[in-house]
Amino acid sequence: MTDFAEIWGYLGREPLLWLTLTLSAYVIGDAASRASGRHPLVNPVLSAVALLAAILWATRTPYLVYFEGAQFVHFMLGPATVALAVPLHAQWGRLRRAAVPMLGAVVAGVCVSVVSVVWIGHALGVDRAVLLSMVPKSATAPVALGVSEAIGGSPTLTAVLVILTGVMGAIVATPLLNALRLRDWRARGLAVGVAAHGIGVARAVQVHETAGAFAAVGMGLSAILTAVLAPVLARLLLGG
């Protein structure tokens, strides 16, 4: 065990180790998802997070040490987001024809997201600072963190909530929308994009090309409108 600890201590200082483990964890999670027939409960992101969390806990590795090595994945979020332009281009005709109802739906979705989390949290006695951190949970992470800091929330807590929201949205979206007998791929994709940001978009892309394109638009519009509407709604609902 002493030899293992010494070897791990040496490897743990190498940034490439954590990048390799991060990519390997996702490959394992994606393989499990494919083996399950892309079942919503076997979400590759959730599987990868659980596996990496177990490794960090078992090796007692601080998160900052891990992030120093895995930050290249964080950097690649930008190009990955830009790559969403490919399905958008393929579905441009449908997107243009549905522009007005899409905008209305996204406004409604953002308002419902903010108002519901404040009301439910307040009814359960959640602390004000936590409520403020929860307000932008459905927006993509960079926007959510900025909004949280601006309205007095905790960006760190918001980051955790954003990940949980995305994973939960990706898991429950398909069975929930099936149960509601919603067959329009445009509506399904838009709903997932508004509610579950990038992780939801990834799930929508897996399910259907049209759903993926509308989910990407929903995520983008939701981020913009959350930045505009969330501070206003938080002030109206919570004061200050």
Image (cartoon, grey):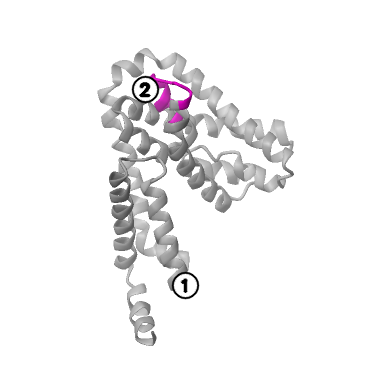
**Amino acid type, mark 2:** Trp
Determine crowd level at label 1: few under 14, some 14-19, many 20+ residues with C-alpha closer than 10 A: few
Q: Is residue 125 left or right of residue 198?
A: right
Residue at left offset 44%, top offset 71%: 58
Residue 234 location, quadrant: top right
Residue 215 location, quadrant: top left
Residue at left offset 36%, top offset 22%: 185
The answer to which of 118 and 42 lies nearer the viewer is 42
Q: Is residue 232 visible?
A: no
Identify the image quadrant of the C terminus: top right
Identify the magenta region.
179-193
Where is residue 15? Give x, y as percent.
Answer: 33, 67
Q: Earlier in the sequence, mark 1 or mark 2?
A: 1
The answer to which of 206 and 138 lies nearer the viewer is 206
Check residue 60 in the rendering and tell me which mark sits there, or answer none.
1
Numbered-mark total: 2
**Amino acid type, mark 1:** Arg
Q: Secondary structure at mark 2?
A: helix
Give the Cα distance between marks 1 and 2: 44 Å
The answer to which of 36 and 58 lies nearer the viewer is 36
Up the image or down, 131 lies above or below 20; here it is above
Residue at left offset 40%, top offset 40%: 40
Is 121 a magenta residue? Answer: no
Residue at left offset 54%, top offset 41%: 137
Where is residue 98? Give x, y as percent.
Answer: 39, 15
Where is residue 165? Give x, y as percent.
Answer: 51, 42
Check residue 185 in the rendering and tell me which mark sits there, or answer none.
2
Check residue 130 in the rendering and tell me which mark sits there, or answer none.
none
